[in-house]
Amino acid sequence: MQSLGNDFVVLDGVSRSLPLSPDQARRIADRHFGIGCDQVLLAEAGQGADFRFRIFNHDGGEVEQCGNGARCFARFLRDRGLTDRDAISVETLSSRMLLRILPDGNVSVDMGPAVFAPARIPFDAEREADLYSLTVDGDNLEISALSMGNPHAVLMVTDVDTAPVERLGPVIESHPRFPARVNVGFCQVVARNHVRLRVFERGVGETLGCGSGACAAVVAGIRLGLLDAEVLVSLPGGDARVAWAGGDASVLLSGPAITVFNGVISLPPDTASGIPN
């Protein structure tokens, strides 16, 4: 499946038990030796919600949140007949979300409130601020730091086309002030209701789209007084919409979710435990 060019392999662990190890997820995500994707998503029965939403990055690490993946996850549950609801509650490693399938086929995700307290991002800072100074390769950068269920650093740039994503992305991702690493967004304000965005995702690299990154960029821009409450976010893979009323209000993300193909993969015996042929 894909949303804004952010692509996923989605697995049904509801109909049957499907243990998935980091090594298995890494092999599935490999674009040369597996199916290939940015992230592997696993649907499981929920305990405090309708379903459990598990997310494995390209490097096999399990992470807390993915906005584009959440939209594909909702579409997958409906298309596979695992639910007939338009509103679906899911639990992740870090939070609980409400996914809504809209009449036009798009999916809206209630991402919950943004988190700014440094210890909860997590980010090494003495106190909460709208902007932080971050030393990278001897240069001082101004970033916003927040969590959308996963950690984000947002840099405001004059032009995303020339922004040093390839150079700064991996350095900021693994900066020691982000103990759990971080997703890095490079955001260009086009108008108060429109931004352009590129995101270097933690454990993945630059992707064509990042839903939680879109939310983080808009929230950061609103906090800095640069944006209105509803914003069109143009990513390399397409457009998403983000709305935030400020404070403790939930951040709402909406956009497409598309099935590309269905298939089967056989993994080598030494890593195939729990993955049926």
Image: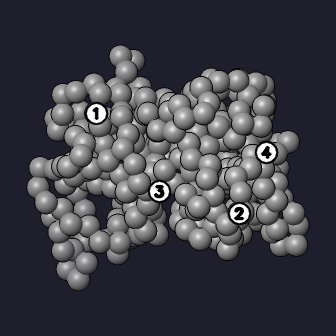
Q: Position of residue 233 (x, y in %)?
A: 64, 32
Q: Determine which of the numbered discs, if any, sits on residue 125 in the image.
A: 2
Q: Nearer the viewer, mark 2 or mark 3?
A: 2
Is residue 233 shown above or below 117?
above
Residue denoted by label 3:
38
Q: Are discs 4 and 2 less than 8 Å apart at CB?
A: no
Q: Secondary structure at mark 2?
A: loop
Task: Judge from the rendering whether residue 47 lies leftward or rightward of residue 129; answer left or right.
Answer: left
Instruction: Depth check: give the residue in front, 84 or 27.
Output: 84
Q: Amino acid at mark 2?
A: Ala
Q: Determine which of the numbered discs, if any, sits on residue 156 in the image.
A: 4
Q: If you read the primary sequence from the N terminus, does the residue marked by circle 2 or circle 3 appear first?
A: 3
Q: Around disc 3, counting alpha carbons within 10 Å, would you say few (fewer than 14), some (14 to 19), or many (20 or more)?
A: many
Q: Secondary structure at mark 1?
A: strand
Q: Amino acid at mark 1?
A: Ile
| Residue 18 at least partly seen | yes
**Real-space Cα distance between discs 4 and 1?**
34 Å
Q: What's the residue at 70%, 24% (across, down)?
A: 228
Q: Determine which of the numbered discs, if any, sits on residue 40 in the image.
A: none
Residue denoted by label 1:
88
Q: Nearer the viewer, mark 1 or mark 3?
A: 1
Q: Around disc 4, counting alpha carbons within 10 Å, would you say few (fewer than 14), some (14 to 19), or many (20 or more)?
A: many
**Real-space Cα distance between discs 2 and 3?**
30 Å
Q: What's the residue at 11%, 55% (across, down)?
A: 16
Q: Secondary structure at mark 3?
A: loop
Q: Amino acid at mark 3?
A: Asp
Q: Secondary structure at mark 4?
A: strand
**Real-space Cα distance between discs 1 and 3?**
24 Å
Q: Amino acid at mark 4?
A: Met
